[in-house]
Image (cartoon, rainbow, N blue to C red):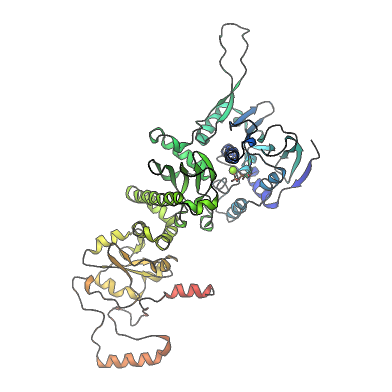
Amino acid sequence: MTQTTQHAFQAEVQEVLNLMIHSLYSNKEIFLRELVSNASDACDKLRFLSLQDDALLEGDAELHIDIAVDKEKRLLTIRDNGIGMSRDEVMENIGTIARSGTKRFLEQVKQGKDDGNQLIGQFGVGFYSAFIVADHVTVLTRRADAEPGEGVHWSSDGSGEYSIGQIDRPHHGTEVILHLKEDEDEFLQDWTLRSLVNRYSDHIGFPIRMLETPPAADDDGEDAETPAPEWKKVNQASALWTLPKGEISDDDYRSFYKHVSHDFEDPRCWAHNQVEGSQNYTSLLYLPSHAPMDFMMQRDEPRGLKLYVKRVFIMDAAEHLLPNYLRFMRGVVDSDDLPLNVSRELLQDNPTVRKIHAAVVRRSLDLLGKLANDDAEGYQAFWGDFGTVLKEGIVEDNGNRERIAGLLRFTSTQDPEAGDVVSLADYIGRAGDDQDTIWYITAESLAAAKHSPHLEIFRKKGIEVLLMHDRIDEWMMGYFHEFEGKKLRSVAKGDVNLANDTESAEGDDKPEVSEADSALLERMKAALGESVQDVRASQRLTDSAACLVLGEHDMAPHLRRMLEQAGQ
Ligand code: ADP
Ligand code: MG
């Protein structure tokens, strides 16, 4: 070994480590899933690079992950023959905060949203979870394209510093060696490790192996030699989405979700489609149970959907396979029609990708529609987390607007306390065929919407109005004018003509105006001058004396204020 040097962890990394070391985790065992998942990612990367240059495999084409224990020394080792890391990569990936996931993780923990339990993994703090169970961690690694003399040795007890040095390492890949804490003996037990692999990592695409002692050939001879232990595969090692659906249990789907999404919780639902014909691809799409803590910030995350080509992991490619408004979806897409050497540039303008994209959108909307039909409560929970995001689709996705609209939920005057539970179909069903308009109001808050004087006439006539109070609503409604042949109109804009909308048609919005009233209107118009366009008598109001009405195409005042504040 050449010279070893000491380095301090970045302050933020140390904070994460302290959390790992001192917190009591209810799910300590997730460290194994995280380390196996890293090993699997490393194998994915090497397999991908070896497509171009199979010399990288150094004659060892069978990528795998080994788990070994040394009970006496209390060591647990997770070893892979994947891509490995250079010295720079080790320093960058393990020990600095360069990775934004770690930073966000800390922010969330500091905001007191969680003690860290739920957040580990979701933010890519995976490697550090080794320190939940280990008081000392050693990493031995070499990159597949480096010389055997360029191996790296990294080691730390998680308090303040790590050491790093150069070693000889004949074989590429990475070995993570955990020295287990006093009370973590269970992770030295063969059966514990096997059951954890089965629970968390059964369907990652590489064999996970453990040593197994074969039974003695005959058991009568006292001095029969115990056979040498052999490496045996302990997981299924089949990419889950390639199996016939009938052979996949719900538990398989759930544990695979945790592997691809880094989520801690079960998914809410999923859709698995194997398409053969002119197109050949498989999609396995998951809807998470909850929004990740930092979800709204990640608009441009490429994570979410993993692209495989013929079972080979290519890249995180959500931005090519999913529109923004479905960015909460997770899963994998595996295409047989794309070349293995696809680049991001190629994905950008590729007809196959475009077709898969369209299909993924369709499947996702189907999945949501099915959830809405089968599990009202589950759908409400989904809506609470992701409804605002789905609304972006009304603006972004012309072609699917009607379908997305069917998935929207609103608060309405029908029962304002019930929250966002009314679909447009519910509204139309209640309104009856005669009413050709779906009425809504947009406002800054539910209270403002509920108490708007614009609602008076509608209340009097018993016409339901959707109370839109989400920030995005005004913007969305600027693009959304019709649903199933009914017009969508704001009660606060333009002339309100309710003639068609009630059985007892009480005439239109242009009431007879007495001479005295016209004089009053004229005087008011003169007094208000430039600040209004017109002053009119209206049947809109029943209790209030006056209200502001916008022109048909005017921007709502709260949206205008928002834009003004933003300096536009
Ligand atoms: P994430 O897996 O979400 O990127 P981790 O903390 O689990 O976050 O890992 C940090 C980084 O360290 C990985 O992105 C990878 O670059 C590197 N790494 C970790 N384990 C391995 C491994 N077994 N082989 C190669 N690189 C690894
Ligand atoms: Mg990881």
- Which sits in the foreground, 73 or 438? 438
| Farthest-out residue, right | 3
Quarter of the N terminus within the rendering: top right
Query: At which x and y percent is residue 517?
Result: 28, 90
Query: At which x and y percent is residue 495?
Result: 30, 78
Q: Can residue 40 be seen in this view?
A: yes
Residue at x 75% of width, y 36% of height: 149
Residue at x 53% of width, y 50% of height: 303
Q: Can residue 137 be seen in this view?
A: no
Query: At which x and y percent is residue 346?
Result: 52, 51
- Which sits in the foreground, 142 or 225? 142
Image-based side of 387 in relation to 142, left or right: left
Q: Ligand 1 quadrant?
A: top right
- Residue 50 position by quadrant: top right
- Residue 471 position by quadrant: bottom left
Image-based side of 239 in relation to 377, left or right: right
Residue at x 59% of width, y 54% of height: 104
Image-based side of 536 in relation to 316, left or right: left
